[in-house]
Amino acid sequence: MSKQVAGDGLPWPDEESDPQRTAEEESDAELREVMVPAAQHQARLDKALAELVPEFSRSYLQQLLAQGDVRLNGQPAAKPAHKVRAGDQVAVRMRPTQQSQAFKPESLPLDVVHEDEHLLVIDKPAGLVVHPAPGNWSGTLLNALLGRDAQAMQVPRAGIVHRLDKDTSGLMVVARNRAAMDALVRMIAAREVSRQYLALAWGAWSGSEQRRIRAPIGRDPRNRLRMAVVDLGQHAGKEACTDFDLLASGEEVCLVRCTLHTGRTHQIRVHMASIRHPLVADALYGGAVGGPMRRQALHAFRLAFTHPVTGKPMEFHAPLPEDMRQALDFWGLRYN
């Protein structure tokens, strides 16, 4: 964060009213002044702030609003639901947090499958966290993107428009400018981005080789660290749909191609567990470690979409990572 002292050039009426704020905290505060772009016209103030100041969480920015640390066109702003207008001037007084300090460039290797002036496609290795979070404030994909390209700092979340779990490997698309990011977000919401995965799961496959699972997913009411198939009449959740196509099956495990039609948290892992085929080494959803696999056996192998700027059809494939290839050999399954 830059070290501009809070109140420099902008008097804050509550400057000395909060006894919890120490002189040291105030000296470390930064005054951030931004203009609301056309894309945020008529957005809620808290939502606009989350886009304009992406290194802070929306909940933290709402806290700043409540504390009187946000001004809109020179006037105190405290209502998160206030609608902003294009051209509005927003000033935010902020203090360093672990989250904000996590938005720093790091020199980390990335396997770049495609690059142009608007976007990147990368093959993420298993073990790489996508976005800083408690327990992983550094060494993430976001840090690597900031270290690779200085302009990534100008794009919310360094251009990350979708995520893979830490232990899931495979393809991700990342925006390099705001126009590409907005377009990709719309495309993902409209299900215009095709994402397919390979999953190695426990249990011999039986029945039809093609199966569509339509089952809503929400927070597991018995374990808040997990997701689960839920009854929407009793629990909060969202509709979810996944297609499964059998590629190979043995006596102990099966290899399945998974096609997402929605993008819920842990969707493939939850749906596979719900049909009694938990992923190999997915301890969270009942999949025991087996063979050489020490992480959930899930790989995003295919990504296809229309380029958000050029309109050109794009399709990418990522080969199986070595641990999954060794696992197939271990159980005598073949995949071409």
Image (cartoon, helix red, strand yellow):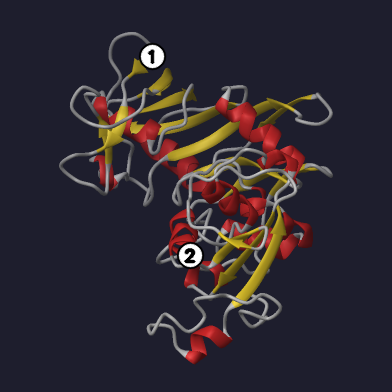
Q: What residue sits 41% from the left and 80% below the top?
A: 18
Please state the total of marks drawn on the protein image: 2
Q: Nearer the viewer, residue 216 or 169?
A: 216
Q: In the shown orientation, is residue 18 left or right of residue 27?
A: left
Q: In the shown orientation, is residue 156 left or right of residue 232?
A: right
Q: Residues within 10 Å of mark 2 (few under 14, many from 20)?
A: some
Q: Residues within 10 Å of mark 1 (few under 14, many from 20)?
A: few
Q: Where residue 62 appears, x then y in whole percent? A: 46, 57
Q: Secondary structure at mark 1?
A: strand
Q: What residue sits 43% from the left and 83% below the top?
A: 21
Quadrant in the rendering for residue 180: top right
Q: What residue sits 48% from the left and 57% below the top?
A: 78
Which residue has dot 2 on it? Answer: 64
Mark 1 and mark 2: span between their CA atoms? 45 Å
Against 132, is 22 above or below?
below
Three-letter amino acid code at the position of disc 1: Arg
Q: Which mark is residue 212?
A: 1
- In the rendered view of the protein, which quadrant contains the C terminus? top right
Three-letter amino acid code at the position of disc 2: Leu
Looking at the image, can residue 160 be seen? yes
Looking at the image, can residue 105 be seen? no
Q: Earlier in the sequence, mark 1 or mark 2?
A: 2
